[in-house]
Image (cartoon, rainbow, N blue to C red):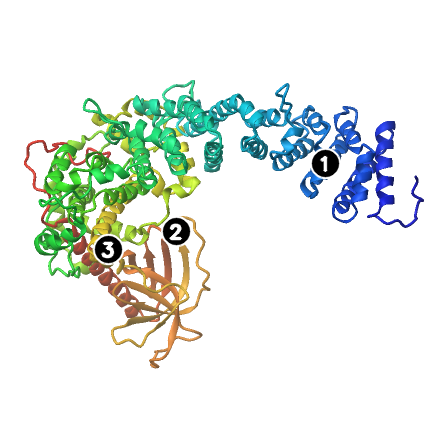
Amino acid sequence: MKRVSGSKYKKFSQENADYLCQEVQRMEESQVFYPGAFVEALRELTEVLIWSDKNAESVFDNFLERSMMSTLERVVTNAEFPSAVKVQAIQCITMMLQNLTRKSSIYFVCSNNHLNRIISIFIDDNDEELFSIYVSFLKSLALRLNEDTVQFFFERETRAFPLFDRASKLLAAPDPMVRAAARQVVISVAQLNEPAIKNFLRDALQEVFKLISTLLWSQIKNLAEAAAEYGNVERHNANELHLMGISTLSDRLEDIVDDMFYINDLFLVPHDFAPFCLECVLEEVVIQPLLMLLEDLPCDICCFSTNSSFTPCVSASVALSVLTRWILLNKSERLQRLFKEGLLNSSASHDGVMKRLLKSECAEVLSGVVVLLKAMLTSGLLENEKKEGGNGPTPDGDETDNEDISEEALDEKEMHVMTDIFNVNWSIEPEHEDSFPPLQPLSIISCEIFIGRMSQQVENAVRCPWFHGLMSAIYFFITHPAYTRFSVFELALSVLMDFVKCRRECVVLFRGLLFLCLFIVRRRAVTCAESSALRQDGTVTSASTPASATASATPNSVHTTTAAGNKNNKSAGAWLRTPYEVVFIKLEHVSHEFGLSEEKLRGNLSNEASFLLPLLPSLDFIRSERERGSNSPHVDCWDVVLRNFREYIAVQKSVAAVVPLRNRAAHDQSEEEKSEFLMWLTIRHYAHRMLNREDGFLLRLRDYGVRHHVGTTVSLSQSNTVYFRCEFVKGRFLFGASSPMVAAGTPMYMLLSETEVLFLGAGDALRPVTDRRVTLCVMFALQMIYVQALVSHSPFSVIVTHVHPASPLQLHIVFRHRKAAASAVNMITELSSLCRFSGAALVCRALNQDGALHVTNEGVSKAPMNSFNNA
């Protein structure tokens, strides 16, 4: 049969189907063809066959009578045929499997072992197109598998199952799409209940379970290797640093998550032997190795590599992260029991793994175990533990809700304990600067004494088996801000509130944590006082000056600084004259960034990946710890860091570029300060929220911020408004940022309020504003506490500098009269000084609250206040 060139033909017809079958057979037998013509014939034949399934059954019957499946088999299995032709032949079969609706048609396509021989062919992995079509073909076969069609693929006598065998070999393929298709085939076969298949699966699934478990462990080691690369600071030079982005860790973690989802599917296989076998294999290959890593944990793998050969291993952070994600995703009661036994089992002779990890002094271990504890609480592993450590029975023997008891007790008996913390009125305007008391260094009580004092005040909370370990971890986070991830600290507070159900006891605990945090903030304030005293004396601290010598001179130095400041007038414009002003400026800046994030730590793989990176504290902190002779488990690593400090700084920069501060440790002193202040404000926020109150201190701090932004409108008609007419000359952002887009000579009004300096566009001319309804657009908005002003060389020109750390700005403006320029400078200087002084008084009150924990001198740490800071 020949088709006349140029003649019209009906595509979907018996004649065209016969012609296409004849052409395909002719080209296959003669092997003389153009590949494009062969591919086009196969493609059109596929379309006609799919059409005929619903419209003309005789067409498909004729296709079978011509033994076209044998022809397609020979096309695919013939090594001499081009890859493009094989691709189209396999795609033809795949399309039929996906679209044919008649059972008889499906049976004919699957019969006579044609498909088994096609499945068994060798496929070159480098031929991506052919390999992709082949995998899609296997997946289509899996979707057609049922109790009736499995007979075409499984040889009962020889127990040969090419489809299952080939799929099981692809389970560990590097391509995720290939792995997904292979897993679909295995699951489809495993769902069959046919007796012969069940006997076959008894041995075959065991091999699959071993393969999946081995693959999971391999994925875990790959993740650990990628994470450990960030800790390898022992390099030949900084140019060899080629770090992977956070997306690499996220991708590898996602591969592990895919394996965990597939394990959930395997546990649902409807055969009695499968769950038990899978449990045993997972326990041997993955779970026990992870738990053994946590049983005897070497601390030197937590942060840095001390070996130049750098042999990667599974670190604590990786092991804890994998267990956390697995516990959250697990749907099997068998695995849940294994996790519970491995992590929680304890006896009279030793604590369980989790309790020992909570007492660890390794910062990365504590971060990981707190997140794991939250996951166990969420998944229900700690449900019984919570009940055992719950409210407990009343003296009458009845279970009661401590929430109601705590409400009454808190209102009538315990509110006096909280009055020194929860002040309602934070509006403070002291009359004299000498009302500021001199800052004195505070010694931080030891962890044992702190937890002991807390235990005496919370009888119900102590019954919780996790109370001491969790409080110990929170104590470590507060007292070691250089190591603390702020997001993990927030999570630890959340877990504490989950365990302590009595609100009165929870408030008491937060009161203790608040004063512990206050010690740290006061220590930071004293450090600021030392710096202020040294600047006042005109001396410079040498790097070799002992920290103890500096600390011993602190009280007198602070008092001298304050006394010297009293001799100056407040309007003199001295910038940050007292340490309280320094702390106020820092706190005010942090308060606007403060906000409890509702983001779920375990819901984002990027967040999880960031927890796998080393903490990398600042070099100043490392040097001070090394000189102090700290007992930290990382001391042995400090020498490696100090020898390779350039590479270490490069690693810090790489981590900081991809991980936000809340998910990593502080890399310098300013970030460490921010962590301290954020922890203090966070505890205050939680404590106030438990009493349904707003933190007046935080609200008052935010009052010093800018209330008007560029582009908004402001009226000058207020009676208490002070404004000056001026013109814009030039302006620039400091630190190389772009200059503001305002033309020179633009007329403006400079408006002064209690907390702001606003520059308003005045239109084409400067004239007094008499209409109360006139509003002007804000061109620049500056916080008063950050503003400094001075008269430049020109008599009418003034330089206004905004020294905000996030948006430093310098404006050059000109006034029409010399007196107006001088008056504006004096007014800005006085208001700015008074504004900062008011903020200093606010901070002074917050830092000198009464009611701190009263402890005896016995056991109190005598370490200098600067023990955690570099002199």
- Of mark 1 and mark 3, the one earlier in the sequence is 1
Which quarter of the figure has residue 184? Answer: top right
Amino acid of disc 3: Leu
Crowd class of label 3 (few under 14; some 14 to 19; many from 20; radius 10 Å): some
Q: Residue at x 21, y 25 (%)?
A: 347
Asked which secondary structure carries label 2, the reply is: loop
Q: Nearer the viewer, mark 3 or mark 2?
A: 3
Q: Considering only vertical position in the picture, is 606 above or below 588?
A: above
Q: Residue at x 61, y 20 (%)?
A: 159
In the rendered image, residue 476, in percent from the top left (x then y), is placed at 23, 35
User: Which residue was labeled with disc 1?
Assistant: 93
> Which residue is outermost to the bottom?
771
Crowd class of label 1 (few under 14; some 14 to 19; many from 20; radius 10 Å): many
Can residue 1 be seen in the rendering of this structure? yes
Give the mark count: 3
Q: Considering only vertical position in the picture, is 489 above or below 213?
A: below
Q: Considering only vertical position in the picture, is 578 above or below 377?
A: below
Q: Nearer the viewer, mark 1 or mark 3?
A: 1
User: Which residue was labeled with disc 2?
Assistant: 734
Q: Residue at x 66, y 34 (%)?
A: 137
Cα–Cα span, label 1 and label 2: 68 Å
- Of mark 1 and mark 2, the one earlier in the sequence is 1
Quadrant placement of the N terminus: top right
Cα–Cα span, label 1 and label 3: 69 Å
Q: Residue at x 70, y 40 (%)?
A: 95
- Left or right of 138? Residue 266 is left
Taking depth in this image into account, of 361 and 494 the one nearest to the observer is 494
Which quarter of the figure has residue 267? Answer: top left
Residue 698, labelled with which disc?
3
Amino acid of disc 1: Ile
